Image (cartoon, helix red, strand yellow):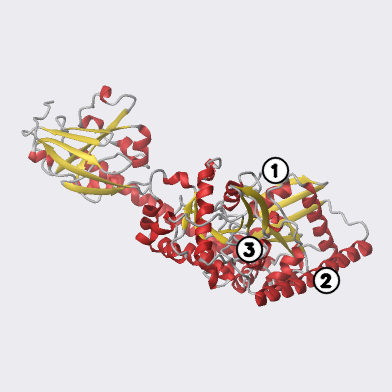
Amino acid sequence: MLQLHVFTLLGTSSPLSELRVVLLGFKDAGKSSSGNTILGREEFQPGQRSAVCVKRQGDVAGRQVTVVEAPGWWSCYSKELSPEMTKRAIQLSPGLCGQGPHVFLLITRADILFTEAQMISARQHLELLSERVWRYTILLFTHGDWLGDTPIEQYIESEGDALKWLTEKCGNRYHVLNNHNSTDGRQVTELLEKIEDMVAGNGSSHFKMDKGLLRDLEEREKIERSRAEERMMKVKQHRHGLRSTQGQIHQSSLRIILLGSKNYGKSSTGNTILGEDVFELCTISKCEKREGEVAGRQLTVVDTPGWELHSMDNPPVFLKQETSMSVSLCDPGPHVFLLIVALDTAVTSQVILQLQKYLTLFSEAIWSHTMVLFDFGDWLGDTLIEQHIESEGRDLCWLIEQCGNRYHVFNNEKKDDKDQVTELLAKIEEMLAGNSGHHYETDRNRLEEVKERREKEEERATERLMKVKRQRKHLQSLKREFLGQCEPAKRVRTLLHATRVLYYTTADVDLGDVDVLSLHAPRSTIDDVSGDGLLDELHSDMVEPTDESTVPGEVPVGALMSRVLSATKILGFQAPMPDMASLGGVWEGVSHSSPQRCCGRHGVSRYSAPNSIQVAVSWQRLPIRPTQG
C-alpha cells in the first residue's frame, strides 16, 4: 500500500512549459468532459461519436497544454470487435502531439463496476501502441463526485483484482476528476503536477512512436484511400447507368423489411424512414408492421426480431419462424431488405457466418433485393463510407459485393434530415429498376410449411394451457372443500403492518395442526401475492377483522385458514409457520427484505413472491400477555 501513496506525495518536479496529453478510454467514460475540464473551457463535444482523433490546445496554469482525444471502444469488447478505423486512430494519436505525448490518460468511471472484461479490453487497446505505453500512462477516474468522502485508494482495493491489476500496470499512477465541478482548478493543477512527476521519473522523456509502424499505417491508409475512390466511382457509374437506361424511376409504393442484429438500430431506422416514432425502441420477439406516406410514396416498413450476430449460439426456432414469416406482411413481396450494420462495430468472419445462417431463412434470391444500411452515421464524421468499407477488409467487402455494391449511411440522431431518407428511397428504386421492376418472390411452399408448423404449435400450446387451467380449477375446488370443514377460530389475530407481524393466540384455543393467516396490507401488495385472486375467495369470518385505524389508508383483505400443506401450496411458502397456536403467547415476525410481506416458521423462513423477490422472516415469542378477544 505504501507504493500507492508515493506518487501522489511527490509533486517536487519542476513545471514544464509544455504538456502533451492523449485521452484514451471506452465509450461514455468521460473523455470529452475530462478534456474540457483540463483546458478549462468547452472544446470537446461530450456524447459525440467519432472515428477520428480530435486535437485541442490551450494555456493552463502557466503551461501550453495539447489535448488529443482518441476514439473510444466498447468497454467489454475485445480489440477484434473494434473497427479498424478506431484501432488505427488510437495508433496514430501520438502523431498529433508533435514530438510525442508526455502522457496517456486512461479514463474509466468511478461509478460503475470495473470488470475483468473491461480490464482485458483496456489492455488490448492500449497495447496497440506497444508495451511501452504503460510507462507513460496514468489512470484517470471520472465521476469523482460519486466517491464522496471515500478515498480513491479504498475504492481501488474494494473493486477487486481487475482494477488493482490495471492500477499496478499503470505504475500505481492515478487521479480523480469531478467533471461536474470543472471550475475547481485545484484538481487540474494537481493532475498536471502528477504528469510532471511521471515525466521526471521517465528521465524527462516522452512517448516515441515506432517509425516502422507509422510507415506501415500510412502506406495501408494510402492503399485503402485509393480503393475507396475506385469503389465510389464504380457505384456512381452504375447508378448513372440505371438512371440513363431506365429513365425517370419513381414508385408509388415501396415495401421494406428491416433485418439485423439486436441493438443495431432497426427500430430507430424504421422511425427515421417513416418520419415519426411508430416503432418502440425495445427488443421484440414478433414482427411489427407500420405504414406511412413519405416523399410522395406509400411505404410499408416491417421490423423483425434481432439476432445475436456476435454469438455462435443458434437462435430460437420461434425467432427463425417469425423472421421468415416477415415477407407475409409485405404481400405480394418486399421490394428491399435493408440489412442494418453498425458502423462502430467490426464486421468479423464470425458475423458473416451468422449472417449467412440468418439469410438462409429466405431463398437465394434475397441477395438481389438486399441493401446494406450503415447505422450510427455520425461516427464517420467527415470520413467517406467507402474508406471505412476498405479499411474493414475482406469480410465487409464480401458482404457489400454480395449485395451488389448497394449501401447507404443513416444518422438516426438527425431524424429531421429528410435528404438521407429521400436518397435511400432513390437507391431502392434504382435497385428495383436493376431487377426489372420485380420485387422479392416469396417462396410460397416454404412459407406455408412455416405457417402450418406454427399453427400446430399454437394448437399444442392452447391444449397445454387448458390442461393447466383444469388442474388449477381442481386444486381450488379441493381447497374450498377443505376450508369448509375447518372450524372458525375467532380468537386468533394476525396483523401485517410494515415489517412487523404480531400473531395473537390464547392458550385455551385448540387449533391442532391448523395455521391461521390474516392479511392486512395495501391492495397493491396483496394483488402482487395473490395474482389469480385466490385471496378474494378466503373466508373473512374465520378471523376477527383488524382495527382499520391501526394501519391508516390500508384495507383489510381477508383471512386464510388451512392446514400447513395447503398454505404452503397456495402462497408458495417453502415452510409452515411455527406451531404458535399450541404454544400460545404473542409472536413477532420481522421481514428481512422487501417487499414487506411476512409469514413463516420458527427461526427463518423464505418464500418466493410472483415477482421473484425473496423475503425472509424471523419469528420469536414476546414476553408479554396476549390481548384477549
Mark 1 lies on residue: 276
Task: Work out which quarter of the rendered image holds the C terminus and state it.
Answer: top left
Amino acid residing under circle 1: Glu
Label 1: element kind: loop
Amino acid residing under circle 2: Glu
Mark 3 lies on residue: 324
Q: Name the one closer to the observer, 306 or 163.
A: 163
Amino acid residing under circle 3: Ser
- Distance between mark 3 and mark 1 Cα atoms: 26 Å
Q: Which mark is residue 230?
A: 2
- Distance between mark 2 and mark 1 Cα atoms: 37 Å
Mark 3 crowd level (few <14, some 14–19, many ≥20, 10 Å Cα): many
Give left or right: position of 284 versus 535: right
Which of label 3 and label 2 is nearer to you? 2
Which of label 2 and label 1 is nearer to you? 2
Give left or right: position of 577 versus 45: left
